[in-house]
Amino acid sequence: MLEEINEQLVKAKERRLAKLRLVDLLACAREDIREQRERCDELRVELDDEKEDVEILEGMTLTSLFQYLAGTRDEQLEKERREYVAAKIKHEEALEAIKESEADRARYESELESFDGADEEYDAALAAKAATLDNANGAANRLEAIGQRSEELEAKKQELVEAAQAGRVALQSLEQVRESLDSARGWGHFDMLGGGMLATMAKHSHLDQARDHVRTAQLHLRRFRRELAHTDHSLQISIEFSGLLQFSDYFFDGLIADWMVQSEISNAASSCEDAVRGVRELLDECRQRLNQCDRELTDQEMKRQRLIEEA
């Protein structure tokens, strides 16, 4: 009878903890969406401003006339076009981030439906267990305490496992970014040495791949951050590649010198290395805490066995 009640309590607690995890993930996703929408509004204003700057220089205004006479109009127009494209890419990425977070929110909401009644099931199982306890029996109380601690450790371990899984996916995405950037940098050096159109096209292709990998990495980093929220860790890693991402729009227009492209690739690669290092450090922490959980679970099991043997 007691064994059956214990089994019911364990299952009810697992469902309750799974529900609480989803509730927390849903709250994080909703907060992400709120922040991303605010950011998107700010970027929309920035985009409109940059577009207006380009239109002013392209039109026959007094400002553009003075710059034309001073010989600086083309230089300024190039600068404004670059800033406009960078703002456009940032805005498009913000819109895409909102869509991804909204998809996560919908998934969490759908999964939560399967946990309706989990709190009530846990309360009922807990009450049934409480009714069986013999408060005069010290060994029973100690066994109960050991069992509760083991359940807490198992729940903590599961949270760390899920965080580590999300972190490994994020790390894999970042490593794909790094690989594409390394290839682009290699072709860029060849291009500067006179590699011709083939080298330019290869560089362009690898930067396009890097752009796609960056967007994927940003998605997985957001998910990693949400999972870490359950483990008392925080993820303060952001990737800013707007300077790099705009280059694909300029390559064949000849608006950016090769050395500028190489400089931006190097900056992006450095940013990627920082992100890889940060994620790896957090994964190491997750592994250390998982090992700690395993050691403590083993210790609790040994205590339980000794208590039963000596009772």
Image (tube, rainbow, N blue to C red):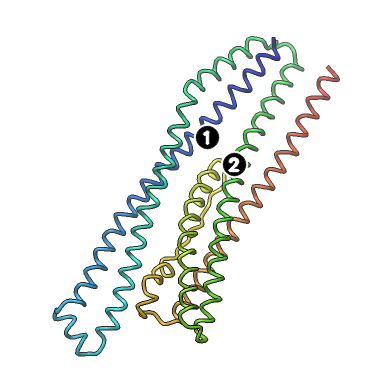
Q: Going by the image, does 167 lie left or right of 249? A: right
Q: Where does the image place residue 91, in percent across and percent down from the top left?
A: 33, 59
- Farthest residue to the front: give it: 198
Based on the displayed image, in which of its 4 quarters is residue 69 positioned? bottom left
Q: Going by the image, does 285 lie left or right of 64? A: right
| Local SS, label 1 | helix
Q: Mark 1 near mark 2, Cβ–Cβ under 8 Å?
A: yes
Q: Amino acid at mark 2?
A: Glu
Numbered circle sitting on residue 162: 2
The C terminus: image quadrant: top right
Q: Where does the image place residue 281, in percent across and percent down from the top left?
A: 63, 56
Pick the front one: 177 or 146: 177
- Farthest residue to the bottom: give it: 70
The residue where tag 1 is placed is 21
How far is mark 1 from mark 2, CA to CA? 11 Å
Residue at (72%, 26%) from the top-left corner?
Answer: 146
Q: Going by the image, does 40 lie left or right of 141? A: left
The image shows residue 186, relative to residue 176, as above or below, that is: below
| Local SS, label 2 | helix
Q: Amino acid at mark 1?
A: Arg
Q: Where does the image place residue 300, in percent across and percent down from the top left?
A: 75, 30
Residue at (58%, 58%) from the top-left corner?
Answer: 278
Q: Where does the image place residue 225, in percent across and percent down from the top left?
A: 51, 48
Q: Residues within 10 Å of mark 1 (few under 14, many from 20)?
A: some
- Farthest residue to the right: give it: 310
